[in-house]
Image: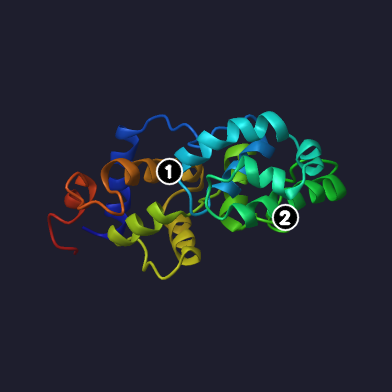
Amino acid sequence: MTKKQRAALVQSELEKLYPEVPIPLDHTDPYTLMVAVALSAQTTDKKVNQVTPELFAVAGTPQRMAKLEEYQIKELIKEIGLSNTKAKNLKRMAELLLERHNGVVPQTYEELEALPGVGHKTASVVMSQAFGFPAFPVDTHIQRLMTQWKLTSGKNVVETEKDAKSIWKEEVWNKLHLQIIFYGREYSPARGKGEKDFITKMLFEEKDK
């Protein structure tokens, strides 16, 4: 099976499994999405969704977040990993949104990635899921599965993102990256043995041509 054929099979099977894909992180607007994604680094989406209702009730806008002290933010997110750093980043992120963007989440990668706690992956999620720009954010599930499916060399997330964008058409990026994440969680978890991972089995039933 060629690389092109593997990519087509992956997309086809994922579309059957997940014709609709909700955004895994609970949010109400671009700002709360950006905060939730920033909090999700090295933490499960499930844990973030458990913590953010209380956080957003108190600080669901940049204006309200900026008024809190770091220790107050940390207390609200203490169950999440790296809470010290994330509390510091959330406060400064809110302050810079007010200083530079009148409290409005910007719609460019350059401006987003200039905010504390917002790396390329977080910016990509915001650009794609909040604003509808084509993007292919790469998380650990995507990195692992695309390597496993021999659709990337797997050297790093930058190369994996580049490979994904070259393999699949732009109009499917925003949905497909979520479909791969959902598949990874359900059928091929990092600590699992891959018994349920039927796509990998389908791809390699015959030798690559």
Which quadrant of the figure has residue 104? top right
Instruction: Look at 81% across and 41% down and name the residue there.
Output: 67
Residue 149: image location, x then y, percent: 28, 57
Q: Position of residue 198 (x, y in %)?
A: 19, 45
Query: Which mark, by number, is residue 97?
Result: none
Q: Nearer the viewer, residue 144 or 75?
A: 75
Mark 2 crowd level (few <14, some 14–19, many ≥20, 10 Å Cα): some
**Among all residues in the image, which is located at the extreme bottom?**
155
Can residue 24 be seen here? The reply is: yes
CA gap between label 2 and label 1 equals: 27 Å
Q: Amino acid at mark 1?
A: Leu
Badge 1: residue crowd in 10 Å (few <14, some 14–19, many ≥20): many
- Camera sees residue 133: no
Q: Residue at x 20, y 53 (%)?
A: 193
Q: How is the image coloured?
A: rainbow
Residue type (three-letter) at the residue carrying disc 2: Leu
Q: From the viewer's perspective, tell me whether residue 207 is left or right of residue 41.
A: left
Q: Is residue 50 above or below residue 126?
A: above
Query: At 39% from the left edge and 41% from the top edge, which residue is drawn?
Result: 179
- Looking at marks 2 and 1 on the same chain, the residue that comes earlier in the sequence is marked by 2
Please, is residue 155 above or below residue 165 in the view? Answer: below
The total number of labels drawn is 2
Residue under the point 75% across and 40% down: 65
Picture coordinates of residue 188, whole percent (x, y): 27, 48
Q: State the mark number for residue 115.
A: 2
Q: Which residue is mark 1?
A: 176
- Between 184 and 2, the one lying in front of the other is 184
The quadrant of the image that shows the C terminus is bottom left
> Where the N terminus falls, by quadrant?
bottom left
Of circles 2 and 1, the one toward us is 2
Q: In this rendering, would 206 be left or right of 108? A: left
